[in-house]
Amino acid sequence: MFQRSEPPDITITWDGRDLPARSGESLATALLAAGVLDFRETPVTGAARGPLCLMGACFDCLVEVEGQQNVQACMTPVRPGLRAAPQHGVRDLPEVEAA
């Protein structure tokens, strides 16, 4: 199991529940330390995905942070009160006006 070397000192919210975190650690690290393994679902099959590389190369850790979709959890530092949620399926795209 994934464990921190230092104790948590802040709280973040994941999918409506409060989780302990350590200031400055990545969101992926905080979630893994709290036992969260499924970060998103694939758009085609709905299969669960979690972090793979933890360095921003694979995009398997995409989540929604503060309402913004397609955020890489491994590249997002936590801060007190951060709100995040799993990303389900295909992301919403903004509508584009025709020229």
Image (cartoon, rainbow, N blue to C red):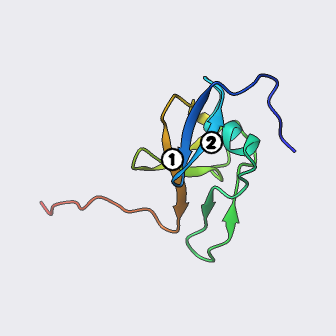
Tell me where residue 63 appears, x and y as whole percent: 54, 51
Q: State whether residue 68 is above or below residue 21.
A: below
The residue drawn where x is 75% and y is 49% is 35
Q: Earlier in the sequence, mark 2 or mark 1?
A: 2
Number of residues whose C-alpha sits closer than 10 Å to that of mark 2, classed few (under 14), some (14–19) or many (20 or more): some
Residue type, numbered disc 2: Leu
Dot 1 corresponds to which residue?
84
Relative image position of residue 8 (x, y in whole percent) = 69, 28
Query: Label 1 neighbourhood size at 10 Å, few (<14), some (14-19), many (20+)?
Result: many
Q: CA gap, disc 2 to disc 1?
A: 11 Å
Q: Residue at x 60, y 68 (%)?
A: 42
User: The N terminus lies in which quarter of the figure?
Assistant: top right
User: Looking at the picture, does residue 9 appear above or below residue 83?
Assistant: above
Q: Please report the residue visible at 55 percent of the width from the left and 38 percent of the height from the top.
A: 12
Is residue 78 left or right of 50 when viewed as pictured?
A: left
Could you say which quadrant of the image residue 41 lies in?
A: bottom right
Q: What element carries label 1?
A: strand
Using the image, tell me which numbered label, if any, was put on residue 47: none
Residue lying at the far right in this picture: please name it: 1
Which residue shows up at 83% across the image and 35% down it? 3
| Residue 43 in the image: above or below residue 30 | below
In the picture of the structure, the residue carrying the numbered disc 2 is 19
Q: What element carries label 2?
A: strand
**Which of the two marks, 2 or 1, is nearer to us in this view?**
2
Q: Which amino acid type is shown beneath numbered disc 1?
A: Ala
